[in-house]
Image (cartoon, rainbow, N blue to C red):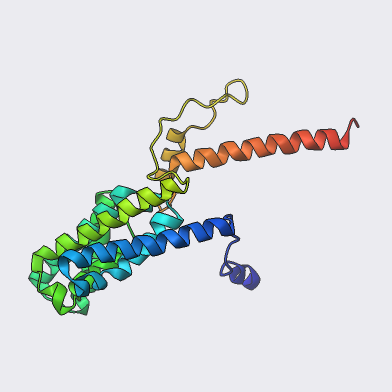
Amino acid sequence: MQTRWISRLLPASTHTRPTEWSRAAIGVSMGTLMSVWVCSLFFGLPVAMHLIGPLGASAILLFAVSSGALAQPWSILGGYFCATLVSLVVVHFLGRDLNSACLAAGVSLIAMCLLRCLHPPAGALSLLIVLADPASASLGWAVLEPVMLAAACMLVAAMAYNNLTRVRYPKKSETAAPAAQAAAGDPGITAQDLQKALEQMEAFIDVTPEDLEALIKASEQNARRRSVTEVFTQGPS
């Protein structure tokens, strides 16, 4: 039992190649630099640097795991907007202290879930907006402007770089065609079935139904190849 518990702490094996790590790393660096630089042109370097933490975290999602549901355009734009707006409301009524910052992070999570724009770096952003540096705090409600400008720049950089490096982004929601019947009376699995399954799990799972459907189809093809190979290898009994 103890060995099984310890095994859960070990990292899972990665399924990406080193070339993909390098591609994503370059994108993260360029995207973060572009966002901070553009933001600094309009609002000054102190304000832009104050946002660099959440921006760097967003860059990891948008460039390294761009197919995830948490890395899509509405997630970053909606998430940043919700976190900033909630934090400003909290500051207006409760001031700037640690308790207010933690409350803002929690309420931001609820707001993002309601608007279907969950984006983890926005949680860090809500803390930074409440516990802002003097330059950012002096902007008041106008701090929403540099936040959204930086988010938009990160999104533009991700869209340009990912597609130029042959990674489709953003992830398009495609209408799934009826799955081929594996046997009489077997309707197969479609994206709609997977969507319902995700909803029934009632947990945060960063994957789209389209990706799940592609994985299932790829697994079925591999299973068929393995079955054919085994038949020819073993021969008639």
Residue 43 visible to an observer of this rendering: yes
60 versus 191 height, above or below: below
Judge by depth and name the residue closer to the eye, 233 or 184.
Answer: 233
Q: Is residue 73 left or right of residue 88?
A: right
Judge by depth and name the residue closer to the eye, 196 or 160.
Answer: 160
Residue at 64% in and 35% down: 221
Residue at 38% in and 39% down: 172
Judge by depth and name the residue closer to the eye, 94 or 39.
Answer: 39
Judge by depth and name the residue closer to the eye, 223 or 23.
Answer: 23
Residue at 47% in and 26% down: 177
Q: Is residue 193 left or right of residue 107?
A: right
Quarter of the picture holding the N terminus: bottom right
Q: Is residue 180 left or right of residue 59?
A: right
In percent of width and height, residue 157 lies at 34, 54
141 versus 97 height, above or below: above
Please state the total of marks drawn on the protein image: 0
In percent of width and height, residue 237 lies at 91, 32
Residue 118 visible to an observer of this rendering: no
In percent of width and height, residue 77 lies at 25, 53
202 versus 229 height, above or below: below
Residue at 65% in and 71% down: 3
Looking at this view, name the residue that lies furthest to the top.
Answer: 184
Location of residue 148 by image quarter: bottom left
In percent of width and height, residue 205 lies at 43, 52
